[in-house]
Image (cartoon, rainbow, N blue to C red):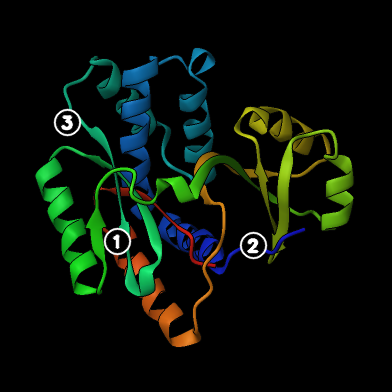
Amino acid sequence: MAGHSKWKQIKHKKAILDSKRGKAFTKLIKEITVAAKIGGGDPNGNPRLRTLLEKAKEINMPIENATRAIKKGTGELPGVSYEQHTYEGYGPSGIAVIVEVLTDNKNRSVADIRRIFTQKGGNLAEHGAVNWMFEKKGIIKAKSNGITEDELLEKLFDHDISEISLDEGTFFITSDIKSIENIKEALSKLGLQVLSADIEWVAKNSLKLDEVSQEKAYEFLNEIEDLEDVQNVYTNLE
């Protein structure tokens, strides 16, 4: 099936590095707090919270950190109120970019994002400027356990999958968002460890750049993603 984009591979490896140095904890705690605030603190009745708690377990976050985040979300403990915002724009060489933010200070967040866009030769645009180039998809990551792409595709043939790729022992499966839970269940039955399952913005068409422009674009994307309030960065860069 179609090859996996280099940016997604970089994000995956960066997430592993961030989890090792604890940086992932901060972002995940924010997400858990917001998920509990929106859908309640019971993971059995809150699928988003359940998924985030699974992710917390995968990166070895202490259970008390997650519990405290849930209680802050439900109001049982005092805490910061986070707001979700999405920004769109064009980065270096015209790459389309969507930035998802969780913040307690919108003015600070947008100022930081705008600064990097401007410094790197891009521009922050209005809502709707680039999101038409993307669609919401389920992205499931799982350990390969020795199975090949073709073998996995055959096993998951009945599910609504648009892409499967394998990178350094990890499968990246792109699916309809309604199929995420069924695919996770099918992977578990096959003995594959599910690393994560999220809803992401996936570009309908990829943009390919020359090597120099590509590296400048990756530098820009990494700087945006390293901002404290930024949760996710999506692009149409191949």
Name the amino acid type tagged 2. His
Q: What is the number of the mark on residue 224?
A: 1
Q: Is residue 84 visible?
A: yes
Q: What is the number of the mark on residue 4?
A: 2
Q: Label 3's element? A: loop
Residue 89, percent across and down? 30, 56
Q: What is the number of the mark on residue 80?
A: 3
Which of 49 and 96 lies nearest the eye of the viewer?
A: 96
- Quadrant placement of the C terminus: bottom right
Mark closer to the chain start, 2 or 1: 2
Q: Nearer the viewer, mark 2 or mark 3?
A: 2
Q: Label 2's element? A: loop
Mark closer to the chain start, 2 or 3: 2
Quarter of the image where one finds residue 40: top left
Separation of disc 2 and disc 1 at Cα? 21 Å
Q: Nearer the viewer, mark 3 or mark 1?
A: 1
